[in-house]
Image (cartoon, rainbow, N blue to C red):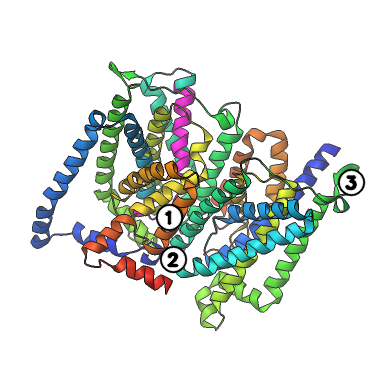
């Protein structure tokens, strides 16, 4: 299976660590964990305190990081854990936005219901799409999910009676819950951050759960898993549903952050953008999508302040990443840590020469 | 049948001609290389725009078609040699490369030709008004169908009567054995990729004449091409013919009667086919 993934080796190390029953390994882990925990704690603290020391623009950008972060987690979960490169995730991202806009903003449905129905709709849609797509593997799966995502986009664009075509739904304002006014940017940022941290934690547990391991098994060899008696089809379908919910939550946060939803947000360039973002971070790593999305969103800000052709610049960056460092940023650091410090550059020279 | 229905059917056939040009190259390349060229739509757009540029500069429509076909063919050749062949074997990296390329092409097209839609005008000598079953119909569209039929026949001849064709057909089934038998599979890959690029270049100029070129048409075209090959079965020329005929009618009648739900109509045949025959109408099981 490893030849059809971007690269096989970091995964192998992960499995080694996972079934580390050896005492030597355990003591090694014990030494490592506090450093990571302290570092993580500092980052989280800095993020929580962000509204106190950063300007509104930084907060807006971090909100962007968070809602696209949900989408990136969703995309990475399917590729990295399940071996399914899905290009429908952006559509799920948009579906919840549309439902919240239609029911919440236009029909005035109150807080938990519009959002819950949105998640329900996304689950239903993911079930229908999943039942069609999950039977297939690899490139065929990619093509089918791409076609499904594009159909959603085109539907949103062409339907004027319900979804208002190109212009989409506007004035989707955040609201107050329990007296906390989420129209205040700092409050909204905090709720996004809290949801994101919870989302990351649940994703972590999911990845490490027996279901997560079964999903890894299906990724490596569906046939063997089927022979062992695992319901391969259902495992893949459930993973598809989980990923859809993550994308959907991201979509709700995005819609309220932008106060609008339009077909532009689910068009193919966004699908490509998020996929390449995840690749840039490193699909084989749990933190890959989060690193990727943080880097790329900020890169977007800098590049688009310099040139109008920032999609071209991003495209070239992605092209180079796929050609020269298919394991992304984290893969690059991992190799550096293992002493292959100049492997990346050596590879470039080899490619050129 | 009334005049309206006949017009719709004829429109559907015209649409099918374009869809076939789009799908046939892609399906052959996929069948052989197991690589899906996701910049197919961007190639279409670029080919159409280059044709448009040549047409505005010289006023010669035929030259525009040739320019579109040649330029995209050469572009495809360069891309295949410089990048795709470097990551051959890993189907994910190959697909991702084409994805990144489509992003770059679409953005560059936008920067050169802007956001307004462009279209070429048919030279009057190939656009006489014909009367078919009592319906007046532009001759150019009939010629489009003729071009598609001609290309289908040419592809059939290439596939079934030449050495290259037998290598391609065998490669669809088992590429390892074919390369072990002494066929230079690398060159075969290249030729098929260039062939598919030339076809989509032609489709770009013809589509730019029959329809319009605008930013965003690249992704619509890519979706159409994907649905054509998913429905027809990957790697099957017959499948591409049949599915483009079905989709052509669907698009034509859908535009007339349910334009708001047009794209959703595409989903229905795809879902049915995939549920019953996951490999497509004429595809073989992998």
Relative depth, front residue between A64 and A15: A64
Q: Position of residue A160 (x, y in %)?
A: 61, 28
Residue drawn 40% across the image and 39% down it: A247
| Residue in the foreground of this view, choosing between B210 and B280 | B210
Q: Which residues are magenta?
A: A78-104
Q: Nearer the viewer, mark 1 or mark 3?
A: 1
Residue depicted at 74% across the width and 58% down the height: B65
Residue with the mark numbered 1: A318
Asked if labels 1 and 2 touch by Cβ distance under 8 angstroms, the answer is no
The dot on residue B90 is 2
Q: Earlier in the sequence, mark 2 or mark 3?
A: 2
Question: Do marks 1 and 3 both belong to one polypeptide chain?
Answer: no
Q: Is residue B121 magenta?
A: no
Q: CA distance from mark 2 to mark 3?
A: 51 Å
Q: Badge 2 local density, few (<14 within 10 Å), some, or many (20+)? A: some
Are callouts 2 and 1 both on one chain?
no
Q: Is residue A214 visible?
A: yes
Say which residue label 3 marks.
Answer: B129
Q: Is residue A306 left or right of residue A8?
A: right
| Label 1: element kind | helix
């Amino acid at each position: 299976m490893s030849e059809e993934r971007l690269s096989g080796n970091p995964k192998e190390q992960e499995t080694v660590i996972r079934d580390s029953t050896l005492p030597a390994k355990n003591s090694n882990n014990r030494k490592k964990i506090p450093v990571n925990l302290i570092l993580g704690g500092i980052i989280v603290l800095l993020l929580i305190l962000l509204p106190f020391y950063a300007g509104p623009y930084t907060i807006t950008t971090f909100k962007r990081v968070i809602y696209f972060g949900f989408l990136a987690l969703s995309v990475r979960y399917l590729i990295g854990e399940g071996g399914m490169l899905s290009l429908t995730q952006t559509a799920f991202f948009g579906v919840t936005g549309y439902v919240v806009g239609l029911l919440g903003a236009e029909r005035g449905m109150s807080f938990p219901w519009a959002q819950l129905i949105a998640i329900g709709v996304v689950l239903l849609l993911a079930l229908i799409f999943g039942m069609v797509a999950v039977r297939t593997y690899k490139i065929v799966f990619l093509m089918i999910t791409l076609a499904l995502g594009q159909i959603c986009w085109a539907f949103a664009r062409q339907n004027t009676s319900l979804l208002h075509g190109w212009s989409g739904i506007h004035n989707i304002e955040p609201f107050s819950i329990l007296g906390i006014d989420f129209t205040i940017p700092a409050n909204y940022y905090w709720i996004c951050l809290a949801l994101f941290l919870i989302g990351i934690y649940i994703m972590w547990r999911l990845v490490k759960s027996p279901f997560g391991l079964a999903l890894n098994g299906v990724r490596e060899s569906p046939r063997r898993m089927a022979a062992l008696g695992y319901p391969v089809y259902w495992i893949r379908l459930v993973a598809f549903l989980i990923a859809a919910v993550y994308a959907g939550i991201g979509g709700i946060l995005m819609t309220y952050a932008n106060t609008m939803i339009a077909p532009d947000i689910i068009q193919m360039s966004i699908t490509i953008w998020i996929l390449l973002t995840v690749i840039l971070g490193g699909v084989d790593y749990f933190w890959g999508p989060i690193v990727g999305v943080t880097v790329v969103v900020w890169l977007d800000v800098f590049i688009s302040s310099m040139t109008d052709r920032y999609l071209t610049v991003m495209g070239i960056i992605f092209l180079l990443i796929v050609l020269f460092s298919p394991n992304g940023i984290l893969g690059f650091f991992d190799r550096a840590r293992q002493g292959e410090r100049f492997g990346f550059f050596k590879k470039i020279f080899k490619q050129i020469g | 049948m009334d005049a309206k229905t006949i017009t719709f059917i004829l429109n559907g056939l015209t649409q099918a001609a374009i869809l076939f040009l789009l799908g046939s190259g892609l399906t052959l390349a996929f069948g052989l290389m197991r690589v899906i060229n996701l910049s197919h739509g961007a190639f279409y757009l670029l080919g159409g725009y280059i044709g448009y540029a040549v047409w505005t500069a010289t006023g010669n429509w035929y030259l525009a078609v040739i320019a579109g076909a040649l330029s995209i063919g050469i572009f495809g050749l360069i891309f295949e040699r410089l990048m795709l062949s470097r990551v051959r074997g890993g189907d994910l990296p190959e697909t991702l490369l084409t994805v990144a390329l489509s992003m770059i092409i679409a953005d560059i097209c936008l920067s050169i030709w802007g956001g307004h839609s462009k279209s070429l005008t048919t030279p009057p000598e190939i656009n006489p008004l014909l009367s078919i079953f009592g319906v007046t119909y532009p001759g150019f569209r009939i010629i489009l169908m003729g071009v598609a039929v001609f290309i289908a026949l040419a592809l059939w001849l290439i596939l079934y009567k030449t050495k290259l064709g037998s290598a391609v057909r065998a490669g669809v089934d088992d590429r390892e054995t074919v390369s072990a038998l002494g066929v230079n599979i690398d060159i075969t890959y290249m030729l098929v990729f260039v062939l598919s690029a030339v076809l989509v270049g032609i489709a770009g100029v013809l589509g730019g004449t029959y329809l319009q070129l605008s930013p965003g048409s690249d992704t619509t075209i890519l979706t159409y091409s994907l649905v054509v090959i998913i429905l027809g079965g990957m790697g099957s020329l017959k499948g591409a013919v049949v599915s483009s005929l079905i989709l052509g009618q669907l698009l034509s009648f859908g535009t007339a009667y349910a334009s708001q739900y047009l794209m959703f109509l595409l989903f229905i045949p795809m879902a049915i086919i995939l549920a019953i025959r996951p490999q497509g109408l004429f595809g073989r099981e992998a």
